[in-house]
Image (tube, rainbow, N blue to C red):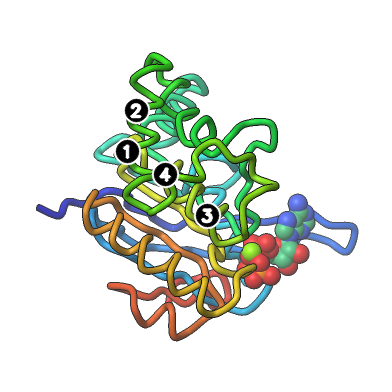
Amino acid sequence: MTEELLVCSNLCKTFLSPEGPIKILDGFNYTFYSGESVAITGASGSGKTTLLNILSGIDEDFSGDIIFKDRNFKELSQIKKEKWRREEVGFIFQDFKLLPRLTAKENVALPLQMLGQSRKISFLKSLEILEKLGLKDRSNHFPTTLSGGEQQRVALARAFVNEQSIIFADEPTGNLDPSTSEIVLRQLFDLNKEKQSLLILVTHDLDLASRMDKQIKLINGKAL
Ligand SMILES: Nc1ncnc2c1ncn2[C@@H]1O[C@H](COP(=O)(O)OP(=O)(O)OP(=O)(O)O)[C@@H](O)[C@H]1O
Ligand SMILES: [Mg+2]
């Protein structure tokens, strides 16, 4: 069943620069529902990454309200917000951001271990999802010994391993060739459907955006 998951009201964000203030978000309103996939598009510099940082609780310097399941972000203490991020949120980045000194299996297990799960259980869950993505025989590889597509699929596994309710993806296929990109996207959409998370994905690729349930275009700091 879908429910309102993130309700954004009148989000505003201004950066201060030597040339004066730059208004990036200017009354952004939108309601995200559980289980749906939403593409955020817009010109370079329109504020897509800025918006993701705000929605994921990384950037707290904004005005307006974000309500997650009836709780206003502004009422959460720092500790509660970090806990929320660990429990509810997964991230997928253009440059993968795997930890270089950890193997694929260890990278995927890390979010579970940060929530207090044992090494044994976290490794079992990690191997289970890596196997689902066809990467079982790469589980002991370090990131530098994986192809770009494999690294991004490990990053997908890490984002979804804890059944997070929201997945943020910022140009997740931006560094991949078209055929690898298609493999990664199919796995991303399959995982999202299976886990029923809210997927919020930033992209320049309008074909990709059209494959998502909904699309938001950021123009002049507002959702179109
Ligand atoms: N810390 C900062 N201080 C001042 N200006 C900033 C800061 N961070 C971002 N900006 C400006 O805010 C605007 C929005 O940046 P943002 O990274 O959100 O754009 P974007 O839509 O993600 O672009 P791209 O598609 O190129 O990734 C840009 O013009 C950028 O220069
Ligand atoms: Mg960006």
Q: Report how far apart the C-alphas of labels 4 and 3 lie in the structure.
A: 31 Å
Q: Quadrant of ligand 1?
A: bottom right
Q: Nearer the viewer, mark 4 or mark 3?
A: 4
Q: The disc labelled 2 sits on which kind of residue? A: Leu
Which tag, 3 or 1, sits closer to the chain's start? 3
Question: Which residue in the rendered view is the most extreme toward the right?
Answer: 18
Using the numbered discs, state the Cα–Cα distance from disc 3 to disc 1 in whole angstroms. 29 Å
Q: Earlier in the sequence, mark 1 or mark 4?
A: 1
Q: Amino acid at mark 3?
A: Leu
Q: Earlier in the sequence, mark 4 or mark 3?
A: 3
The one of 118 and 21 positioned closer to us in this rendering: 118
Residue 94 appears left or right of 165: right
In primary-sequence order, the first of circles 2 and 3 is 3
Report x, y in % for residue 103: 58, 34
Hey, what amino acid is under mark 4?
Lys
Q: Position of residue 162 (x, y in %)?
A: 34, 35
The label on residue 55 is: none
Is residue 23 visible to the viewer in this orientation of the structure?
A: no
Instruction: Write down the residue under mark 2.
Output: 124
Up-down relation of residue 213 to residue 89 (above or below): below
Mark 1 sits on what residue? 128
Q: Which residue is mark 3?
A: 52
Secondary structure under the numbered disc 2 in the rendered image: helix
The vertical placement of 82 against 61, above or below, is: above
Q: Quote the CA–CA distance across marks 2 and 4.
A: 11 Å
Q: Secondary structure at mark 1?
A: helix
Which three-letter amino acid code belongs to the residue tagged 1? Glu
Mark 2 and mark 1 in contact? Answer it, CB < 8 Å.
Answer: yes
Q: CA distance from mark 1 to mark 4?
A: 8 Å
**Rendering coords of residue 76 (x, y %):** 42, 27
Do tag 3 and tag 1 residues touch (Cβ < 8 Å)?
no
The residue at which mark 4 appears reads as: 136
